[in-house]
């Protein structure tokens, strides 16, 4: 046990030298200051060395629970399959011919087939330009005029 006694004495001497050095170098004492010196930790009188009393580790500090939430699954947009539909029914009707505004240019005459005919003059659009037009129209049995040439 001489090794332990020498270590303890060496520690005490070191502590005293340290305390004197801090006192001399620090200057005058300040208010609210304190010095604490400790050699080797707590010593309990009912458990002499080398059997120091050990209380164990400090109790764990529990904080609020930590919840780990996985990220939401990715959103995948899938276009719905098209619903087959029959093609639309198209009904085509021939438009009625547009009336031609014409000015008669001569007297009416009877053609070889017995119809009443006459020469006419009108203005027609050709390529976006107005052009004079000439021709012959004959009267039909229903009373309407039909362009012959």
Image: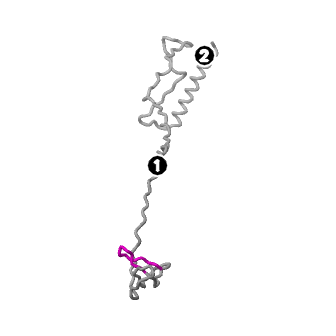
Residue tagged by mark 1?
Answer: 86
Residue 21 against residue 5 in the figure, above or below: below
State the separation of the CA atoms marked 1 and 2. Answer: 108 Å
Residue 95 against residue 82 in the figure, above or below: below
Task: Please tell me whether mark 1 sits on a helix, a strand or a loop.
Answer: loop
Residue 18, given in percent of the width and then of the height, sits at 56, 30
Few, some or many C-alpha atoms within 10 Å of disc 1 (few <14, some 14-19, many ≥20)?
few
- Is residue 119 inside the magenta stretch? no
Task: Please tell me whether mark 2 sits on a helix, a strand or a loop.
Answer: helix
Q: Which mark is residue 5?
A: 2
Residue 95, given in percent of the width and then of the height, sits at 41, 67
Residue 89 against residue 139 in the figure, above or below: above
| Left or right for 83, reference 12 | left
- Looking at the image, is mark 1 or mark 2 earlier in the sequence? 2
Residue 59, given in percent of the width and then of the height, sits at 46, 21
Quarter of the image holding residue 97?
Answer: bottom left
Which residue occupies the foreground of this view, 57 or 31?
A: 57
- Is residue 146 inside the magenta stretch? yes
Which residue occupies the foreground of this view, 146 or 17?
A: 146
Please identify the quadrant where the N terminus is shown: top right
What are the residue bounds of the magenta stretch?
A: 137-149
Residue 79, given in percent of the width and then of the height, sits at 49, 45
Residue name at image x 39 percent, y 88 percent: 107
Residue name at image x 52 percent, y 21 percent: 41
Task: Name the outermost residue toward the right.
Answer: 3
């Amino acid at each position: 046990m001489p090794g332990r006694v020498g270590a303890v004495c060496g520690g005490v001497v070191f502590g005293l030298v340290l305390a004197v050095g801090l006192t001399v170098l620090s200057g005058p004492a300040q208010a609210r200051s304190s010095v604490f010196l400790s050699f080797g930790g707590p010593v309990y009188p009912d458990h002499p060395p080398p059997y120091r009393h050990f209380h164990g580790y400090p109790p764990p500090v529990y904080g609020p629970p930590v919840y780990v939430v996985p990220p939401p699954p990715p959103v995948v947009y899938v276009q719905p399959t098209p619903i087959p539909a029959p093609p639309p029914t198209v009904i085509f009707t021939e438009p009625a011919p547009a009336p031609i505004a014409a000015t008669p240019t001569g007297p009416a005459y009877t053609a070889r087939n017995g119809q009443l005919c006459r020469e006419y003059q009108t203005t027609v659009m050709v390529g976006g330009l107005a052009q004079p037009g000439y021709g012959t129209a004959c009267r039909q049995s229903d009373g309407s005029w039909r362009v012959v040439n």
